Amino acid sequence: MPLFTRRAVIGPVAALLVLAACQGSSPSPSSNASGAASSSAVASVAASPVATVPTDQLAFAGKLLICSDIPYPPQEFYDANGDPTGSDIDLGKEIAKRLALTPEIINSFFDTINEAVNAGKCDIVISAENVNKERLAVVDMIPYFEAGQAFVVAKGNPKGIKTELDLCGKKVAAEAGTTEAAYIQGTGDFKGDGLDKKCTTAGKAVISLSLPTKDSDALLALAAGQVDAYFADSPVAGYYTVQQPGQFELSGVTVQVVPEGIVIPFAKKALSAAVLAALKSMAADGTYASILGKYGLKDYGVDESTMKVETTHPAGK
């Protein structure tokens, strides 16, 4: 997913110290069956909502519970006060405001985040989640962002990773349950293909893939020299290289530019319609572009005409 920058919430301090704080003294996730973790509520609602959500479409009347996997900056992370922030978080809060609902951010593990929304642990998911066939089989999605996937390496690119095949036989870290993991392993939308297959076809060794449950742990593996590259959405990858230019750089390998989507359970059509109305109203009045611009992501926004509810589930049509 493309490149980016973002506002200076986490100044020139070492990114690793920030990440440690995110997982330590700041609200940090604790695993449970649904994948839901810590939460944060913000009381802000609109006087004149653009749409009304029936109470039976919500986990709790008057609230919009938003699942997001934190940290994954610049789209979702904790600020210096330990509060959730980022482009996805701001978009979610603004959607809630325009629906006259109080937003509540629920930190969740990415590999079970759609299970959480389907189980009613949250109402929607906004968490840099790529739109693909596998996900559309279990949830509806509204495209709201576009990005590619990029590899971060140590400063100076000591392993000489300049092409995809240069990754063959190398150690790579990517968060579990992500498109990045599927792309390397040849699973999900890449079934029968993938980077490992490209390696074997070229007569090279497959990639040694590490799959931590939090993206920040994947970056820490690179920082500790445990892996040769960290694979993530390009806005995230670019974020870390800008924040820590003396430690990380982009390899120059970027692949698979695809849309990301807001997730809603396929059975909750009134909620989907309301979220879509709020998002379109934000695009129409410039708020959508303003939020993305605040984090250096304006170039990754989608046109209002592409904002629609994507559904393939038979019961959801």
Image: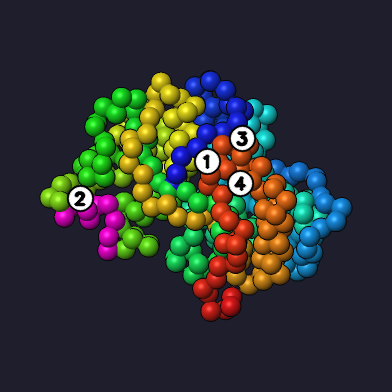
Q: Does the rendering let one see residue 183? A: yes
Q: Position of residue 23 (x, y in %)?
A: 55, 34
Q: Residue at x 26, y 45 (%)?
A: 164
Could you tell me the amino acid type at mark 3? Answer: Tyr
Q: Nearer the viewer, residue 18 or 45?
A: 45
Task: Check residue 72 in the rendering and tell me which mark sits there, or answer none.
Answer: 1
User: Secondary structure beneath disc 2?
Assistant: helix
Q: Position of residue 236 (x, y in %)?
A: 48, 39
Q: Is residue 262 magenta?
A: no
Could you tell me the amino acid type at mark 2? Answer: Cys
Q: Position of residue 57 (x, y in %)?
A: 72, 67
Instruction: Tell me the magenta residue range.
Output: 192-201
What residue is shown with label 2?
199
Task: Check residue 78 in the rendering and tell me which mark sits there, or answer none.
Answer: 3
Image quarter where the C terminus lies is: bottom right
Secondary structure of the magenta portion, mostly? helix
Could you tell me the amino acid type at mark 4? Answer: Asp
**Mark 2 and mark 1: span between their CA atoms?**
29 Å
What residue is shown with label 4?
88
